[in-house]
Amino acid sequence: MARQNVTIHTTRPSDTKPTPEDPSWAMVIDLQKCVGCDSCTVACKAENRTPPGVSYNVVVEEETGTYPNVRRVNLPRPCMQCDVPPCVSVCPVNATYKNSDGVVVIDAERCIGCRYCITACPYGARSFDFGGTYSDEMQGYTDVQSPEYGVQRGKRGSYTPPVGTVRKCTFCTHRTARGEEPACCETCIGDARYFGDLNDPNSVVSQLAASPRAFRLREELGTEPRVWYLR
Amino acid sequence: MSTASRARGIPTTSPQRSHWWSRDPNTAPFLNPRARTIWYAVLMLALAVGSWGLYNRVFGGLATTDLTSTMPWGAWVAFYIYFVGLSAGAFLVSSLIYVFGMHQFERIGRAALLSAIVSMGVALCFIGADLGRMERAPITLLFFHWTSPLSWEVRFYTLYIALLIAELVVAIRLQKRLVRSVEAAHRTMRILGTIGVPLAIFGVHGGTGTIFAVVKARAMWAGGLFPVIFVISAMVSGTALLMAVHYWQARGAGRVPDRALIRNLSTVLLAAIFIDLGLTFYEFIVPLLAFEHHDQSIIMLQAFGPYAWTFWIVQMFMGLLLPAAIILSPLKKRTGALVAAAMICVIGIIGVRFNIVVPPLIPPVIEGYPTGDYFPTITEWLLSVFFIAGGALVYSLVSEWQPIHEPDPDDHAAIAADAGMPDAELRTEQETI
């Protein structure tokens, strides 16, 4: 397939408020269906070509109880795209902000790399790009970067943004802009991830988020995550 | 001495110096030749060694540090808050003189202001080096985000440095009797100092504490006590620093350190240490008795983790308990012992700053994540040496150039003590002149 040039319209919070026409992206992850295969993590790394030490998506494997009464939970963790994002409120230069579609985005051209947002994120969903590369183990790794936010960045240099800035899961804005699902949802072998528009009351995510099985991570912090889990 | 001040009848009281190294007869030497050679040699060596760290940082980026996305902040942030604290503490001591009229500290006034400026500069170097994209540091002044304490801090720091420089310039002009009216200059100092006190307490250092206190994701940072502890421990380190600076500069210049001044400063230091100990007690006892498990895990880490020695030995023993014990013991009669207490304290507070930054980042935010692990790399240490030596160099050069450590021209007793002659003799000499 030919590479598409996609323009993503990110609107700074001061510019416009979300309109009813804007989608309001959310994700629901069914923990009963997740088998812990990590394919979402791999798909995310491949899609976003994230460097070593940067993973937008991880799967936390948690084992509780003592044998034989053991419970194991695989907890896939993308960015929660919080509605009250602590990372956004601490950014000194407004480099990270809530987009009108509900996704928390980062302006790599403005981020100063102070990493305050990383300390502030209660979900550990942000990573700093130290400039690492897989070129030792993968041919042509630096030849092209993912068109995050629709920006074609070309080759990955040793000190060109996003190197030296903070990076995070964006629900694959470059994919959603052309009507595709985030890479992690598309690749999930157990169909454990659902992605959709909260503004549409009939969407799967709207319905599942209202399920009695639904919960959100560290809800006591009041961050209002946009990722629901089904227990 | 300007003709204007002569005409106004302000006494020209500075003693004439016969030392060959003194360029300006009104300015005492910063250091005598031997001490100067040793001091600058040490600084040059430190800068030379430290420049390797600078080279690594500039060309290797933050990958040369031990920082990761799990441990996003480390030694440089700790040193940054340490030097902001030294600055705020030194400035608050100067405000005792210029705002609250405690003239027993007059002798240290300009040194306090210069220390505050230089410490702030060093702090900004540290946090600048810690930025992923150093070249974008100036845009922090361009874009403002009102919910971010860091965004406010950048503005407070700028204001604070401008105010400190203005105050130091007036103080130096007053010292050189270049001002049109001594009273007006004193009033200006009082006004600047009065603006500076809330700026230093709430803006600069309380604000730096707020950077951490608003992070609800990290236990032991979040909370209202944090900014207060920041200010008090700033007072501890700033006072201790000034005691050490005064003592060693006087010794280096071949003068007798002002014993009364050091004793008075040690009283301030002791008071600050006691308040700090009290606040530290509350900081730990409240989460322990509330069984806040996130806080408890960090307290356990501080008290019994791999770097527990930094908490017990550096922070508690060197930073607070030992200096307090020395100041309270019969040793307090010896100036040298008080200065030793101050120097131990200055180093100990580094432990306080490290324990603020590092341990709360170690426990994973979500169970199942990797645990943080951090120890500064050689590059981080060397660059720290470079910045600290650079700050000491700037301080020394300004002290060489301007009268920073000289006693006030009206303080006859101090001048007499300095010149090694009895007060009466000096006065007679001046009258003759």
Image: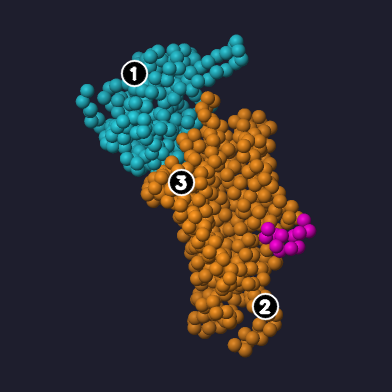
Chain colours: A cyan, B orange
- Amino acid at pointer 1: Glu
- Amino acid at pointer 3: Asp
Magenta-tinted stretch: B329-340
| Magenta stretch: includes residue B283 | no
At x 65% / y 47%, what residue is drawn? B314
Q: Is residue A7 above or below residue B20?
A: above
Q: Which mark is residue A128?
A: none
B75 or B290, which lies in front?
B75
- Amino acid at pointer 2: Gly
Spatial separation of the CA atoms under disc 1 and disc 2? 86 Å
Q: Around disc 1, counting alpha carbons within 10 Å, would you say few (fewer than 14), some (14 to 19), or many (20 or more)?
A: some
Q: Are marks 1 and 2 in contact (CB under 8 Å)?
A: no
Q: Secondary structure at mark 1?
A: helix
The residue that mark 3 highlights is B130
B274 or A89, which lies in front?
B274
Q: Is residue B319 visible?
A: yes
Q: Chain of mark 1?
A: A
The residue that mark 1 highlights is A186
Q: Is residue A187 above or below residue B227?
A: above
Which badge, 2 or 3, is on the more N-terminal residue?
A: 3
Where's residue B249, x and y in %?
Answer: 60, 66
| Magenta stretch: includes residue B334 | yes
Q: Which mark is residue B420?
A: 2
Q: Quadrant of residue A186?
A: top left
Q: Quadrant of residue B225?
A: top right
At x 50% / y 71%, what residue is drawn? B401
B329 or A45, which lies in front?
A45
